[in-house]
Amino acid sequence: MKEIRIFSPATVANVACGFDVLGFCLDTIGDEMVIRKTDHKGIRITKIEGYNLPYEAEQNVAGVSALAMYNDLQPDCGFEIEIYKRIKPGSGIGSSSASAAGSVFGMNVLLGQPLNKTQLTYFAMKGEALASQCEHADNLAPAIFGGFTLVKSVKPLQILELPTPTDLYATLIHPQIEIKTADSRAILPEAVPLQNAIIQWANVGSLVHALHTSDYDLIKDSLNDVIIERFRKQLIPHFDAVKTAVLKAGALGCAISGSGPSIFALSKSKATAKSVEEAMKNVYSKTDILFETYVSKINTEGIRVI
Ligand code: HSE
């Protein structure tokens, strides 16, 4: 095989209480990429459609992760990468992760799968770091593994795959404003009050238990963030109004997706997820901010060859 086309999905990081550790994978939003083996050595980005991103491999997240893997494996060939970008950079749904993970996933398939998913995540983190100025894997892990994941540790890299309850659906609203991950990290405090930390880690533990037991009431009770949201919601117009409307419409929980500005909700059933989408639209259609909404089943497969 010399060439493959892949679907590299959008992802939701943090999942309310799990800042930098929890994430899940979406199904209806993602980039497409073509990865091609060549006789010329090296990594070349030969096509980018959708958004204006750098072609120099060293300045492109897909190129940086590809180079990290390429320099380590030193294969007897080169690779060309085409990126059909559909996830807007700075949207909070893992745009940079989709690119960073897609290139290494595709190269690995063409090389006969020498690396496992944790090793792919390790190289993809090098690309992610270019975008967010820190190596975090909470978008990359769900993109590569699918479903819900927990990044137990970054050094050494340890990723746990969590089960996905079958009736769970995500709804997202993406206000068309850009928030850079580096900026929304810069506004966070360095220390947190112990009382809040206790609430937060109890929520993470109970959310993990709820996913294992498909306990939707406990999912609802656990999807709360008492540490990060209060700072970041100031960057997202009408966040509180969306959250109130969404919970009234029956969502299990609602929070900022990754570093924002997208807001996600989880619901039990597609019908509720659709009602939640209407509730989100109602809030934002009264403003002059452009937006897009999505309803997605949780993608348990992750990146796939198409
Ligand atoms: N966990 C990261 C953050 C995700 O919230 O900053 C960035 O997409």
Image (cartoon, helix red, strand yellow):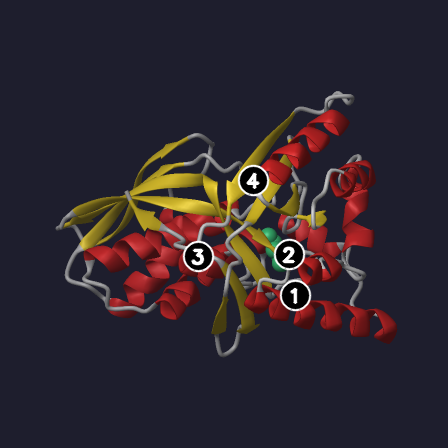
Three-letter amino acid code at the position of disc 2: Val
Q: Name the residue under label 2.
A: 15
Using the numbered discs, state the Cα–Cα distance from disc 1 to disc 3 in whole angstroms.
Answer: 17 Å
Q: Name the residue under label 1.
A: 207
- Judging from the image, what secondary structure is the residue with disc 4 in? helix
Give the numbered dot on residue 270. Answer: 4
Q: In front: mark 4 or mark 2?
A: 4
Q: In this view, does 242 lie to the left or right of 115?
A: right
Q: Where is residue 52 in the image (x, y as percent from the top left)?
A: 47, 32
Badges 1 and 2: C-beta atoms under 8 Å apart? Answer: yes
Using the numbered discs, state the Cα–Cα distance from disc 4 to disc 2 in whole angstroms.
Answer: 19 Å
Q: In front: mark 4 or mark 1?
A: 4
Give the numbered dot on residue 56. Answer: none
Mark 1: few, some, or many residues within 10 Å (few <14, many ≥20)? many
- Ligand 1 placement by image quarter: bottom right
Using the numbered discs, state the Cα–Cα distance from disc 2 to disc 3 in whole angstroms.
Answer: 15 Å
| N-term-proximal mark, 4 vs 2 | 2
Is ligand 1 closer than 8 angstroms to the Cβ of mark 1?
A: no
Using the numbered discs, state the Cα–Cα distance from disc 4 to disc 1 in whole angstroms.
Answer: 20 Å
Three-letter amino acid code at the position of disc 1: Leu
